[in-house]
Image (tube, rainbow, N blue to C red):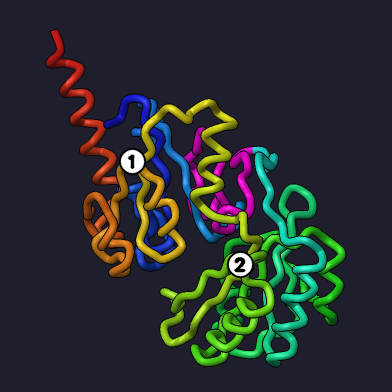
Amino acid sequence: MIHKTLFVADLDGTLLAPDATLSEYSRHTLRALLAEGLLFTVATARALPSIRAILGDVALPLPVIELNGALVSDAATGRRVAVHALSSDVASAVLATICDRGLSAFIATAGDEAGRLYYAQLPNPAMVWYRDEKVALADPRLRALADPRIALAEQVVSFTLLAERDAIVALAADVREALADQVRLYLHENIYCRGWWELTIQDRCASKSGAIASLRRALDLESWRLVVFGDGLNDLDMFQVADHAVAVENAVAEIAAIASEIAARNDQDGVVRWLAAAMGEAQRSRHASP
């Protein structure tokens, strides 16, 4: 399954341990597998600065898929391969709806190489956690604003909010009613701040499956097999287009139900152990061939 196969893994809840780090086993083994020719990248809700900080010395040979597919970028240089931004009118409408609900959002923009991550208020502990995590990872995108409308002068790729469930669900319903065919919404309980719900609002074309398709076209990999790994609802669309979809044991029920296979949990290095076994099997097959 290694020959002419592209492997794509989600990060949080999948490749990463429950503390949002890459274990030493996964780090060491993944570096070795990449050196042996594994064609692997990640598709995540995170942005490039966080991806770089977390992966560290694991140098991915392919562009990475950021912000659930809103951006595809070269991991080393930051050069953008694809951008799916909200139109200025839609971004304005989304921000107005958020403000009408008395909520506050992190606003990610494409901008320069790193882009920006703007915020005006941090009204609850989950929003503070989200900001503080970016600070801990030395994310250069962070910018505090007195007026969030200033961010609309740039190319907005996503709005992210964390709040109590009822408030988030109500906002999602408002956005769907007003902009249903122009946006894509990702709604889930945050796995690091249990009890707080997270909503991300992006362009309708921003998806992991769409970004993978863009990546395959750009690299002439459309005829290669696609194997994906995931755990959450934002992985659903890439599971639906994969030739083989592997859910980690801790995946949500909707993902586990459509998976081709279940791997060990993320706290047991399930993804990298699966990749190492597949690589070992491929090597044994080659050595056994006459």
Report how far apart the C-alphas of labels 1 and 2 lie in the structure.
34 Å
x, y percentage for residue 220? Answer: 53, 26
Can you see residue 253? yes
Q: Which label belongs to residue 92?
A: none
51 left or right of 227?
A: right
Name the quadrant of the C terminus: top left
Please identify the quarter of the rendering in which residue 13 is found: bottom left
Q: Which residue in the protein does label 1 denote?
A: 243
> Which residue is rendered at x = 63% and y = 66% of the image?
181
Which kind of residue does numbered mark 2 sit on?
Lys
Q: Find the magenta span and give its range.
A: 51-76
For label 2, the residue is: 134
Is residue 46 found inside the magenta-colored segment of the image? no
Q: Kindly identify the amino acid type of the residue bearing the numbered disc 1.
A: Asp
State left or right for residue 274 relative to residue 76: left
**Image location of residue 164, percent across then percent down:** 52, 90
Residue at (32, 69) in percent of width and height:
252
Give the quadrant of the N terminus: top left
N-terminal of the two: label 1 or label 2? 2
Residue 49 in sight from this viewpoint: no
Residue at the (67%, 38%) spot, across then down: 77
* SS assignment at label 1: loop
Q: Secondary structure at mark 2?
A: helix
The stretch drawn in magenta includes residue 71: yes
Specify the farthest residue to the top.
290
How far from the left and from the top, in percent, is residue 194? 41, 83
